[in-house]
Amino acid sequence: MSVSLTVMTFNLHEDQPQDSPNSWERRRDLCISVITSYSPMILCTQQGIKSQLDHLQQGLPGYNQFGISRKGSQDTSDEHCNIFYDKEKVELLEGGTFWLSDSPSVPGSMSWGAAVPCIATWATFQLKGVEPPGFSFQIVNTNMDEFSPRARRRSALLTWQHIASLPPSLPVVYCGGFNTQKESTTGRFLLGRSREHGVVGDMRDVWPNARVRKNVSLIRTYHGFKGDKQGALEFFKLILRALCLCWDRQTQDLHVDWILFRGRSLVPALCEVVNDNIDGYYPSSHYPIFAEFMLPRSVRLLEPPPNQEEN
């Protein structure tokens, strides 16, 4: 049987008052329902605080999680970029967090005009139950600064340098909230279309490369809890922007949540903008993104042992 790697990136978005229809208390079970229905092998969360992550952990008993706060391991109040993983399918080999700043090992550090500390959490996993054993990959999960283009560019460079330092044979999936579109200088650098400090990135975008894409009409991933019910003027601006981008297949979307990848052994089979909702209420102000990668034919599921029937 062929083996696939499934990844979901999910911005949890905490900033809503308790009496809001979009408060965490009112949408947390919907978050768990959406995640459960897709059952990703890897779930990358952004902007989650400890209480949210604890609730997800309770509702997802088949998963473990890895990550710390953007203010450091001792902090329990601020946002995380935690990575949840299906503990029956993958084993966590190692992981870490670095800060998107000139001092990447200093918790809470900020540079380049960033408004808040930003982090990248990475984890290397090994598949369980496959032959030959030992197929590994790394996940890098981030949430970039919302206001400073320079901070995003330098954050992208710093994270790409981390990825470029890895063995070329190790596949990498780099995802999260980039808070900019792919035609920006940040996206163009990561996708190998412009230089940043003399170097060019070499990531690929799952969305245009997937064999199957779902919900292509949802041209952006941030919707502010409105879904596709946008105002007429705002909708017109989106359509005009999309038409202006049609000349370039790599930028036919206004996604700010991305799943990028590196490595010949990852073949994007499917990518979906997840718009699941209940009566117009959504699990987040961002649509999650779900992707499936097919792995090489040489990686096969182990044959289950034959049933031992009693005579």
Image (cartoon, rainbow, N blue to C red):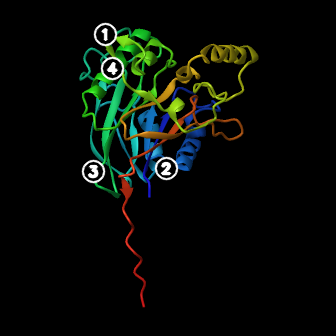
**Image quarter of residue 18:** top right
Neighbourhood count class around disc 4 (C-alpha, 10 Å): few under 14, some 14–19, many 20 upward: many
The Cα atoms of the two marked residues, 3 and 2, are separated by 30 Å
In the rendered structure, find residue 59 and report the number of the disc placed on it: 2
In the rendered structure, find residue 250 and report the number of the disc placed on it: none
Element marked by disc 2? helix
Q: Nearer the viewer, mark 4 or mark 2?
A: 4
Asked whether disc 1 touches disc 4, contact meaning CB atoms under 8 Å apart, the reply is no
| Residue to which mark 4 is pinned | 100
The Cα atoms of the two marked residues, 4 and 3, are separated by 31 Å
The Cα atoms of the two marked residues, 2 and 1, are separated by 44 Å
Asked whether disc 3 touches disc 1, contact meaning CB atoms under 8 Å apart, the reply is no
Mark 3 vs 1, N-terminal side: 3
Neighbourhood count class around disc 3 (C-alpha, 10 Å): few under 14, some 14–19, many 20 upward: few
Horizontal arrangement in the rendering, residue 277 relative to residue 170 (left or right)? right
Quadrant in which the C terminus is drawn: bottom left
Across and down, in percent, residue 65 comes to: 37, 43
**Residue at 43% over, 28% down:** 204
The Cα atoms of the two marked residues, 4 and 2, are separated by 31 Å
Mark 2 vs 1, N-terminal side: 2
The Cα atoms of the two marked residues, 3 and 1, are separated by 36 Å
Asked whether disc 2 touches disc 1, contact meaning CB atoms under 8 Å apart, the reply is no
| Residue to which mark 3 is pinned | 134
